[in-house]
Amino acid sequence: MDEALLRSLTPTVIAVLVRRGADFAAAEDAVQDALIEAVRTWPRDRPHDPQGWLITVAWRKFLDAARAEASRRRREESAHAETVPGPAVAVDDTLQLYFLCAHPSLSPASAVALTLRAVGGLTTRQIAQAYLVPEATMAQRISRAKRTVAGVRLNRPGDLATVLRVLYLVFNEGYSGEVDLAAEAIRLARQVAALSRHEEAAGLLALMLLHHARRPARTRPDGSLVPLAEQDRGRWDTRLIAEGVDVLQAALARDRLGEFQAQAAVAALHADARTAAETDWVQIVEWYDELLRLTGSPVARLNRAVAVGEADGPRAGLAALAALDPALPRYAAAEAYLHERDGDPVTAARRYADAARAASNLAERDHLTRQAARLNAQLRD
């Protein structure tokens, strides 16, 4: 196999696909798939025109992916048109694809990344942000996963934990952006919970329902974000909250705690408070302690530091935050909030501005910029 030839042809093939109408990221993915096909087939059947072969196969891969994406979008639109509450009545091929892509030949991290890219429809950048790694690192991980399963029959479904992780990340992306992704993740989580009867599947479903219940209150008419403490709780979906709490309580009763149940318990405590001031922050800190015992997640440590700041005062929260890596996403925003509560608007304004520059989406960036501007305006008055 002439790997140098493949590398030299790759830019030309990508350029041809782009000229034919593919966007650059989709063209890259299609060419990567064509290269994997070349690695498999060329040793025994090398084409007379390698470049023409690559263009033909890559274009076919691109069309297949475009059709799959269009089909997925139609399913999502159909799911979003339905009412979110209610049991699932059937299992469609989307859920089966999630399980098949979580193949035993892949490590859990690679299976999650590949499934998010191939079935979940997330971009490499979105997946990298979810895993707190550089985009190039994630691109290499996905490419390795594709090479691993090239030529492998996808007839051995992967484990439940991997599929739950994928659905969790898809929901997170939808929760911070596209509604259709969140609704689709909930629809599939219902199916997994009904089929598996596993307490963590139920915990994930409860977590999604409790977070989704707050969606109507999370943004203003102009699209700007509304922080949890300022949300109109009368706009929260009480049916989804009641369902989420019922699902969570049934899962916790099995006494096999997992990370999704612990996260859902935190969400349930927020949902149970009639006002922000009535939030039981002491219990929330305790649930974050359980979550850290289960996962050691740096994001959970960051959230715990904010909860400590609410339960024991901002200085205690800042002390907990100081033990963490400042490069963590939303670290600067959490520090700004705690400094503001501690009566230090100068530092808070500066850190809000820092957080705005590091924000990964426009709505969050605008919110943090406004927070910095608000404090700077107060300092000038």
Image (cartoon, grey):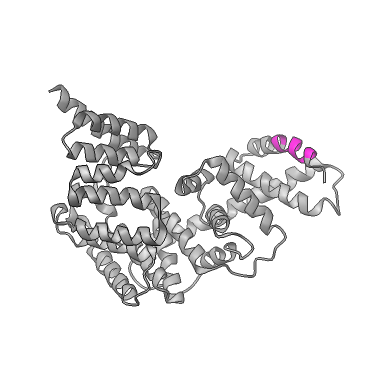
Query: Split into 4 quadrants, where in the image is the C terminus?
Result: top left
Choose between 245 and 105: the one closer to the eye. 105
Residue 162 locus on image (x, y percent): 51, 63
Q: Looking at the magenta stretch, what is its main secondary structure? A: helix
Q: Is residue 10 magenta?
A: yes
Q: Residue at x 50, y 68 (%)?
A: 160
Q: Residue at x 44, y 71 (%)?
A: 191
56 left or right, relative to 366 = right
Residue 89 locus on image (x, y percent): 43, 75
Q: Is residue 360 magenta?
A: no
Q: Residue at x 14, y 55 (%)?
A: 275
Count of numbered circles on the image:
0
Residue 377 locus on image (x, y percent): 18, 26
Name which quarter of the figure residue 258 lies in. Answer: bottom left
Above or below, 1 relative to 201: above
289 left or right, relative to 199 = left
Residue 140 locus on image (x, y percent): 61, 45
368 left or right, relative to 154 = left
Name which quarter of the figure residue 55 lies in. Answer: top right
Can residue 82 be seen here? The reply is no
Choose between 332 and 156: the one closer to the eye. 332
Can residue 340 be seen here? The reply is yes
342 left or right, relative to 306 = left
Q: Residue at x 58, y 45 (%)?
A: 139
The outermost residue toward the top is 380
Q: Which residues are magenta?
A: 4-12
Above or below, 353 relative to 82: above
